[in-house]
Amino acid sequence: MFSFFISFVRLKLVATLFSVLFLYSEGAASLEHPKGQLKLSTKVWQLAYYEGGYHKNYYDYLVATVEGLVNLGWIEPIEIPKIENTKRLWGWLANNVKSEHLKFIENNYFSAKWDQNLRIKLRQEVIQKVNQPNKIDLIFAMGTWAGEDLANNKHRTPTFVISSSDPVKTGIIQSAEKSGYKHVFARVSPQRYEKQIRLFHDLVKFKKLGIAYENTKNGEAYAALESVTKIAKEKKFELVSCHTKSDIPDGTLATSSVLSCVHTLVNEVDALYITVQNGVNNHSIPKIVQIANTKQVATLSQQGIDEVKYGMLMSVSPVGFETTGQFIANALIEVFNGANPGDLKQIYDVENSVAINLETADKIGTYIYAEWLAVADVIYKKISMPGSKQP
């Protein structure tokens, strides 16, 4: 079994950490527009939703976007219940949201359910519908599949790609600075994953990093493989890969493929980068944590603080979805007031937080010095189970 000990984190490192975190905050201060200066539109926008398949992030981003529109006065104040299902959530919004300018159309919900054959048929159906007059005025494209299917010249309907790990790498947009399509907007956070890996290595000093991902173009994009490879060369650590199944309708197979890779990797590496994919979920995370902690392997969550709460060692990510939702809402109202989606600023840099789990640190033999605690924004003393109310 491998164990390691983090050397004393000197004040210089603390300063470096604060500098890194400061960079995340650029652009975050001007997320909200003043109310009362926005409602220039006189039309009622009929909204639609398209996803490659269910992912919890999509649900959270949709809720955060609606709440952002509430904050800006485009939707009347409303309390959204915890539904945890994008189809039922969309139906609830269609029947409960009150707005002078926005209408969530219940029949304008589309999900390919991670089925490639269904995706082909659905893509044709969606494009046909957006080209019909008075059917869809703007569509939320959740995830890479949806972004790929709608970022083209087959239609001109405003399209917001909201939750894609790397819309540049997957060809959804031309670059972080330029969409390439007048009707397409895709939120992008350049160097986000590089910063995650760099900070993780600065603190843990691992020599071999394991990463599990689907061996496809999209799988590599979800796992930020290009960024991880770049930092591996920079920091001179070895990258050990294992291939999973992710964008498939069989969630059980996706989960088992991830667990199989984790079982394999913990015998070869001293750290794991747990990336966003369908097999990393509330059912598999406790098992991933148990496997890694038993082998004393450090874990970095790409997703965020919830996974640290459930036992991964650390994360560097936004706290919650609120600021992202507000950023998207601001961009939406620009379009509602006449702007082209492709002309808007897509780069989203927001303040991120470091989260650590002290019980996991103890289990894998990592001593947490006060300097590390000083830069951590969220500290969990215990490992919680998904669904528990334990803080």
Image (tube, grey):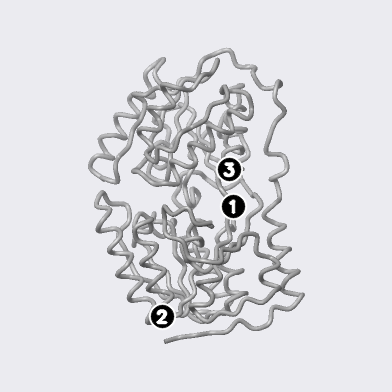
> In the structure shown, which secondary structural element does the residue marked by tag 2 occupy?
loop
Give the Cα separation between the discs numbered 1 and 2. Answer: 29 Å
Assess disc 2: are there few (<14), some (14-19) or many (≥20) residues with their C-alpha within 10 Å of its C-alpha: some
Task: Identify the residue at image location x=72%, y=69%.
Answer: 16
Q: Which residue is mark 3?
A: 324
Give the Cα separation between the discs numbered 1 and 3. Answer: 9 Å
Q: Which residue is mark 2?
A: 295
Rendering quarter of residue 371: bottom right
Coordinates of residue 78 in the picture (x, y in percent): 53, 26
Location of the N terminus (image quadrant) = bottom left
In the image, 31: left or right of 246?
Answer: right
Coordinates of residue 238 in the picture (x, y in percent): 48, 79
In this rendering, the answer to whether 134 lies above or below 278 is above
Q: Are marks 2 and 3 in contact (CB under 8 Å)?
A: no
Q: Which residue is mark 1?
A: 318
Assess disc 3: are there few (<14), some (14-19) or many (≥20) residues with their C-alpha within 10 Å of its C-alpha: many
In the image, 249: left or right of 280?
Answer: left
Q: Foreground residue, 245 or 88?
A: 88
Q: Foreground residue, 134 or 258?
A: 258
Task: Identify the residue at image location x=61%, y=43%.
Answer: 323
Q: Earlier in the sequence, mark 1 or mark 3?
A: 1
In this rendering, the answer to whether 169 lies above or below 185 is below
Give the Cα separation between the discs numbered 2 and 3. Answer: 36 Å
Coordinates of residue 20 in the picture (x, y in percent): 69, 62
* Number of marks in the rendered image: 3
In this rendering, the answer to whether 80 lies above or below 177 is above
Tell me the amino acid under the disc marked 3.
Answer: Thr
Coordinates of residue 207 in the picture (x, y in percent): 51, 82
Tell me the amino acid under the disc marked 2.
Answer: Lys
> In the structure shown, which secondary structural element does the residue marked by tag 1 occupy?
loop
